[in-house]
Amino acid sequence: MDFRVLGPVRAWRGDTELDLGPPKRRALLALLLVHVDRPVSFGEILLILWGESPPDTAANAVHQHIGALRRLFEPGLPARGTSRWLIRSSGGYRLDVDPHTVDLFRFRGLRQEAARLAELDRRGEAAGKLLEALSLWHGPTAAGISPEIRSQQSFTAVDGERLSALKSAAEWVPAAEPAVAEGVLAALRQAALEHPLDEVLQARLMLVLAATGHQAEALEVYRSVRDALAVDLGLDPGPDLQSAQQQVLRAMTSAPQTPASPAEVQTLPALRPAQLPMDLVVFAGRRQELDLFRTLLSESAEARAASMVTVGGMAGVGKTALAVHWAHQVAHLFPDGQLYADLRGFHPSGVVTSPAEVMLRFLDALGVPPHRVPPSLEAQAALFRSLLAGRRVLIVLDNVRDSEHVRSLLPGAPGCFTIVTSRHQLYELVAAQGATAVTLELMPHAEARELLSRRIGAARVGLEPRAVADIIELSGRLPLILAMVSARAAMNRGFSLHSIAEKLCAAHGSLDAFSGESPGSDARSVFAWSYRTLTPAAARLFRLMALHPGPDCSLAATARLTRQTAAQLRPQLSELLRAHLIVETVPGRFGCHDLLRAYAGELARQPESAEETAGARRRLYDYYLHSAHAASSVLFPGRERLELEPPVVGADPVTVLDQPAAVAWLDTEQAVLIAAIEQDARHGSGRHSWQLATALELYLDRIGSWPVQFNVQSTAAQVAERIGDRHGQACTLRSLGFVNGRLRRWAEADLHLNRALELFAEIGDRNGGARTHRLFAFLANQRGRHHEALDHYRIASDLYRSSGWASGQASVHNEVGWTHILLGEYAQAVDRCRQAIEGHREIGDRNGQAAAWDSLGYAQHHLREYDDALSSFEHAARLYRSTCDRYLEADTLVHIGDTQLAAGRDAPAAQAWRQALKILDEIGHPDADPVRDKLHSLGAGSGAVAERSSELRHNFG
């Protein structure tokens, strides 16, 4: 008989291999073979073959399998005869065979002999014996039986014997013959694949590789295991692995060395390395950058100088793909070869490839024997530059951490060209080395569409153009994300692109739709590589900036988020800018890609960040609310004020000194403020949402953003109702009613304004009710119901008088005057407008004065008192100009043009209208078209006085 258990379980009788039957029987034989020197108890058999809870039939099954094996080994054995080889012993069974017929025992015998030789200091022979022992293995112990059974200690212990023998053989390789060394190396390589995290085994492999002339591969083994330990276990290399790395490096750079001298460099073999990774066959776009590279290459050739280009940009923007693609395109122009190294500056393991490691690989690729490599990096760099002198070599240094990371790897010789990619801005390479910096932006829409076409087919892309456009935008025009989405579409050809776009839309605002099977194809992992390189202060800033509603954030708002000064923030912002985690949209304002914002938001939502996040969000909302309220108060001093809670500590609002500053701040922050209203409505308390909407109401109305106003006030009204804030409901319904009137939705306007009146009455807010009546009157005038308007104004005046609100009373005088104008009662209008002017002057309300002067001028115009009208309009225009109310300044300029035309002065009329049109076009106001029509009519010779172009000619404060 002959038995094998070092690999698949097998048995022979003479030259005939036996059929061992079903898996459980083979497992039973394997168990007896690994314990061939002792009996195996019945309980142990049951436990190993069936686990803790064997079935009732297990014992009977064991007896059946034992009987079958006996008959197989001894075909002539009687039914109840005594077996020669498989006998009952000590309450179990024992395989009683000659140990030399079992491969496991032959293996153990060879190991013992190797140990004896090693004790006699005959280690080379010992390594040979172990190699002979290892040759008996044909796979894991008892390969082919159930994994659950094979995982039992009875079998894994035997596997451990193999690894132990292999490690001993590796230790004795330096004394062995070359053939033995190569045999041990082959066995080590196979075992290392099977046990990638066994540090001792991997360390032995490194040392054998180095001893057999494979130093570069040895260092690559170290890098691979180091990364695997970091990613899979979160561990650094242990002492065995670190020691092996140091031994390899010392062996490459220590005596007996004879470093190549400059003269001897010329005698080294001129190897032509070709290390570029495979080009991306579906590469698309980046034409502008490729054209720039060609120009730089041409200039480099003309200047006969070593040139360099740095390719920067955020994670996933396609830096490596572009560098490798272009390198392949121009490789033929570098007949002396191409060198490539991934320096892993942002690797998921967190372990960076050192310049020393890359230098050794480059020198090896250029044909420098290990014993000719100088010991220091500085000397190696000098040798590297000498080797490249007079050669044309293309060098790609990919994924570097910073400028210092690659300084020693740069050539100095004319004719060489270097491409360096990094997520960080490499200022020093640009400043000190003259590199040309190229920053990759998000893909243009056309190039993103081309990328999708290359990956999933132009026909499929052409069938669903709308879905393609949605996919491009939802992927943030980021090549990595587009590639991931393309892969999903390519692997699911039955899915429509519309369905894929819908899934992306459903996951918008998170990274759930962009997870991959490896760190390199997972959006979270890719972004995390950059995040982990940040200092703690910059990392905190990155997390908190995700709370900002967007689209960009001022330095002042960032200071409120973090409770830091501008001086403290600037280094942190610079760090985030260098890492391409944020962008500076305009000087002093910072934005972030949507997917990076989503990643930062996930970090900010971690439980350990909850308290910090809540405080930062409150400070930010308070800052925007109180700043907007302050700006609105300066712009519209006659408007009743919201009673706000004081801002929390660290949320100090901006100081708005005058009306130009107020307009500038509101114009700059408009998009942010609107986003804040939406954000607080969805994720906050809701209080900031409706208060901020109310603070912005007059500003949005003045600039003619009525659709935006409608959306903002609708959101605010809903949230005020949800949180049960009756004052908030009253204010937002009033605003919503008025903007519905602006949009000619009369029924909705009346509904909301009436409900606002009820709420103001319920809470006893007379000024709020008075202003609601004024808005009712304004809309009544729009519909030609002038007497109804006067009724509303009388009620508003009474409410203001009872509350003592002088500004409101002055405004009512002006608006009543305007209503008399609409009724043709111009003399009465003049009296009312003069009362309004005086009232606003007494309280210092320039905006109210301007509105009253404008109405007075309009009444005088209709009385044909053109010079007086022009004087009144000039008063109004100057005041509007001083308060930076550009829309009403333009509106008054239109009136000046109308009056000039009525007085028969066409040229001054056209000049005034052109000034008005310029302003209206600049602010994008809908009243621009009627003014443009006036200019055309004037060109056609019309002398008619046009009606007033704007409906907003009163101060509703």
Image (tube, rainbow, N blue to C red):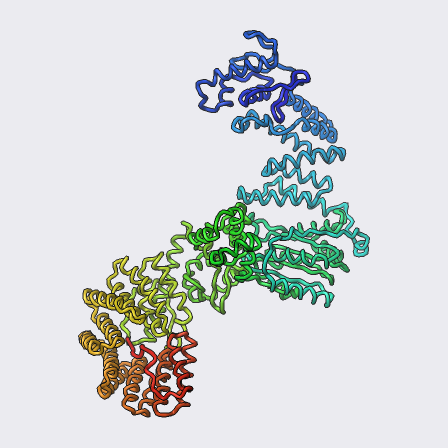
Q: Nearer the viewer, residue 390 or 653?
A: 390
In this rendering, position of residue 694 left or right of residue 565: left
* Residue 399, percent from left and from top: 60, 55
Residue 400 in the image: above or below residue 185: below
User: At 24% across and 72% down in the image, what residue appears?
Assistant: 776
**Front residue of this view, candidates 257 and 92:** 92
The image quadrant that residue 754 belongs to is bottom left
Q: Residue at x 40, y 65 (%)?
A: 672
Q: Position of residue 302 (x, y in %)?
A: 73, 67
Q: Is residue 80 rendered to the left or right of residue 17?
A: left
Q: Quadrant of the C terminus?
A: bottom left
Q: Is residue 564 left or right of residue 857?
A: right
Q: Position of residue 494 (x, y in %)?
A: 49, 47
Question: Which image quadrant: the N terminus?
Answer: top right
Residue 745: where, in percent of width, then height? 29, 68
**Which residue does the image show at 41% across and 58% down from the upper left?**
547
